Amino acid sequence: MSRTPRAGVAPARQRTISTFRLSALDLMLRGCATLYISEPELLGLAQLVQPGDVCLDIGAAYGMYTYPLAALVGPAGQVHSFEPLPNPYRILAAGRRASGADHIHVYNAALGPVAGSHLMTLPYRFGLPIHTWAHLQIGLQRHGRKVSFSSSRTLTVQVRTVDEVCARQGIAHVNFMKVDVEGFESGVLTGAQRILEQCRPTLLLEIIDRHLEKYGMTSDDIVGYLRKRDYAMYAWASGRWVRVDKVAAGRRNYLFLADKARLY
């Protein structure tokens, strides 16, 4: 996954260029977050991760979280970003190359409870793919609430587990996991049992009932699963992380801190 510096460019200068590019991407995305163009939770990442941390961006799409996380953890840390859909992955990989950030590692794969090749549904509307409604067919029980899609395409994608990736890549500790997988959050957590038990990473999950119901799950199921493992739930509100007890309409993302974790 490492990247060889361009011929004729000294490593120190290359690192400076990479840092500048990564900082520019980070500033742009956090600026968009202040305007609610990108997700406002980006503004709270600095309280969750530190230089040298290892982060997983699961359901990375184009890298909205990848680049701010990479800027925060710095060259001493690592960001591992997973995106199964071909076009978003190509853009993510191109952005990673353009940034020059060797501590970002990208994977054209989904994460779930079991490794292998599995089917994913990609809906289309007016001839355009709706990536935010793409979903794995593993454990699919229903198609969810009625939404006006003109068609859909079935893709075969690679699925890995968090525990398998960490073992294969030699990742001994994970500090932070962001998971945005259109209702398949329980599948990702099932495949991360060892990491959850041994590392107690901070979790930032998208929790939306209309996506969860495709897999016969509810927001209460996800929250209850993590509460049993001594995770406390927070939401980003008025510029800070606020303790909350349940999932509320109109809010997508929730922070879960392990019993001994704290905000920086």
Image: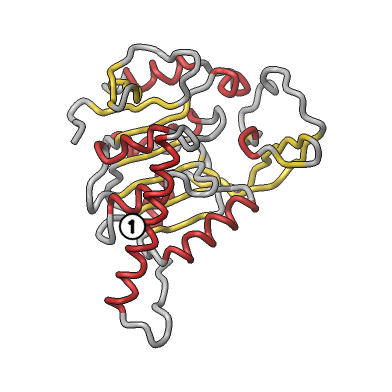
Q: Does 48 appear above or below 222?
A: below
Q: In which image quadrant can residue 247 be found? A: top left
Q: Is residue 31 left or right of residue 249?
A: left
Residue 222 position, x and y percent, is 44, 20
Q: In which image quadrant can residue 221 be found? A: top left
Depth check, front residue: 10 or 134: 10
Q: Does 65 appear above or below 17?
A: above
Q: In which image quadrant can residue 169 be found? A: bottom left
Depth check, front residue: 19 or 246: 19
The figure's colour scheme reads: secondary structure
Residue drawn at x 72%, y 22% as measured from the top left: 147
Residue 5 position, x and y percent, is 39, 78
Residue 66 position, x and y percent, is 42, 49
Q: Does 100 appear above or below 104?
A: below
Q: Is residue 117 left or right of residue 208?
A: right
Residue 65 position, x and y percent, is 42, 44
Residue drawn at x 30%, y 70% as measured from the top left: 16
Q: How many marks?
A: 1
Q: Is residue 219 left or right of residue 233?
A: right
Residue tagged 1: 170
Label 1 packing within 10 angstroms: few (<14), some (14-19), many (20+): few
Depth check, front residue: 155 or 8: 8
Could you tell me the amino acid type at mark 1?
Gly
Q: Is residue 35 left or right of residue 94?
A: left
The image quadrant where one finds the N terminus is bottom left
Residue drawn at x 39%, y 87% as measured from the top left: 8
